[in-house]
Amino acid sequence: RVSNHSQNAIDEFDNTSADILRQRRQVTTLSLTSQKRRGKKITMVTAYDFPSAMHVQRANIDMILVGDSAAMVELGYDTTQPITLDQMLHHCQAVKRGVEASINGIKSKMEKAKTPLLVGDMPFGSYEYNDLDIALKNAYRFVKEGGMDAIKLEGGSKHRAKTIKHVVEGGVAVMGHIGLTPQAISVIGGFRAQGRTAARAREMIDEALRLQDAGAFSVVLECVPSNVAKAVTETLEIPTIGIGAGGGTSGQVLVYHDMLGMMSHPHHQEFMPKFCKSYAQVGHAITEGLDAFKKEVEDGTFPGEEYSPYLMNDDEKRAFEVLLEQDSIERERKHEEATRKMKQADEYEQLSLYGGKDQ
């Protein structure tokens, strides 16, 4: 038998659990298709680490793309090609932890939390092989090690469709990507808009259909004319996510660093893709904060008493002063000896390396 007290506790637990489940809205590949059918636009933003993932989740963005653009905005490469599979998994794991921490924090306050769909970008050289099991094996790593819900592949060729079909049949959801495919810049001649001729635009519709038939749940359209993107979107049942493709797609994606002005500076113009709108100037605030820190350290304002919170009681202070007095002569001797050695080393460096210039 269960006592009334125990039964009440069980009922309370069940009600709380039900509330949390209702408040935790998991975005899925099926819910995204439903959004397209209902005409509700889909949002996707890139994230590459713990804090950016927390910020994106808190904004209730539908999807987080752990993009291979990390190679450029996080690691400083000129293209996306150099980033490795292991490096991408490192970023995926950090994003997964950030999303979970953010959701757990929201649940503790009993607020509504959306769990975004996490998509991992498979990097150049991890899926293009004739042996389709290589792509499937690496896709499994994104799910099992990286904590991703799906992966993204670039390209719309027949071979790429076969790869997508094989990965989907293996149990991993796949997002396609056509138009400008940054991993293929060596072939397409750089970061150039695509689909600007009638023939190429028509090919893109065939590519998109090919990816849909292969089992892709969504397709990214990058840097294509808006009328072409609109035609592709209207042709497909699955949603399209545009970046530099106009407003006729099912949703939009932007790079976290670009849209927030992470690299902006009050006195230096940063490069910004033509299609990217800057919604903030975070870089300005970062510069101001760093400048203020440097100034306050140099003039002695920081930390001050307000930021020096760890104190000794009066008895311990007196005992410490006694201990200092006991060996003050020996400490002064060691200090003078260390100062003499450092001065000698500094003079040696100046004479041997800087042409004898006395500073």
Image (cartoon, grey):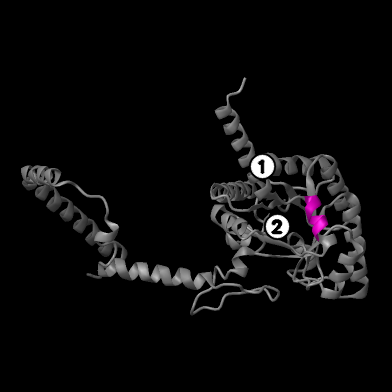
**Quick check: is 198 in the magenta stretch?**
no
Q: Residue 159's x, y, as percent? A: 88, 51
- Which mark is nearer the camera, 2 or 1? 1
User: Which label is found at residue 223?
Assistant: none
The image quarter in which residue 64 lies: bottom right
Q: How many marks?
A: 2
First in sequence, mark 2 or 1: give its number.
Answer: 1
Q: Nearer the viewer, residue 159 or 222?
A: 222
Residue type, mark 2 in image: Asp
Residue under numbered circle 2: 62
Q: Residues within 10 Å of mark 2 (few under 14, many from 20)?
A: many
SS majority, magenta:
helix
Which residue lies at the image location 17% right of the left edge and 51% below the top edge? 338
Residue 233 drawn above or below residue 217: below
Q: Residue 351's x, y, as percent? A: 25, 64
Q: CA distance from mark 2 to mark 1?
A: 22 Å
User: Which label is found at residue 18?
Assistant: 1
Q: Residue 307's x, y, as percent? A: 29, 58
